Image (cartoon, helix red, strand yellow):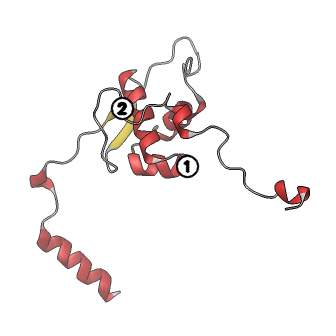
Amino acid sequence: MRADEWGSRDPGPAVRPYALTGGRTEPADGEILDVIAMVVAVVRPARDGEAEDFAGLVPEHRRILSLCRQPATVADLAADTGLPLGVIRVLLADLTAQGRITVLPQRPADEQPSADLLREVLHGLRAL
């Protein structure tokens, strides 16, 4: 490979995923979030016009917080940040422990759509 071809290739991430999590592969609390779990940033009132307090946060935590201003799924966060799902889960656990995000409750099973309704939707989609 010629030297001028190196500049045109995507070098990939500058930091390996395990470095972002301090080598952790699972959240410290042991609770692994489902890929469809919805998370949202906790709104903290600003003090005297101060900007949001990001002290002690790595850029990935900051990016996640900005994406979580609106509720987002764990899978969406992994896709939007380009980080592996396992890394996102560990970083989300960090933010949850700090009280910066919260996991929204999922609907109880009795509020889930019925199998008949799902079949009707599927048939309708196939008809398109």
Q: Give the residue number, with chain letter if any, for mark 2.
A: 27
30 or 117, which lies in front? 30
Q: Residue furthest front?
A: 1
Label 1 Cα neighbours within 10 Å, binned few <14 / some 14-19 / many ≥20: few
Give whichever of 2, 68 is nearer the camera: 2
Determine the residue positioned at 57% across, 27% down: 58
Which amino acid, by three-letter code, is at mark 1? Gly
Percent across and percent down for residue 20 are: 54, 32
Q: CA distance from mark 1 to mark 2?
A: 19 Å
Which sits in the foreground, 4 or 51?
4
x then y, percent, for residue 52: 55, 22
Instruction: Report the side of 38 relative to 3 (left or right).
Output: left
* Residue with the mark numbered 1: 82
Q: Of marks 1 and 2, which one's residue comes earlier in the chain?
A: 2
Which residue sits at x=24%, y=76%?
A: 121
Estimate the x, y position of residue 63 in percent, counting from the top left.
56, 36
Kindly identify the residue that appears in the image at 39 percent across and 43 percent down. Answer: 71
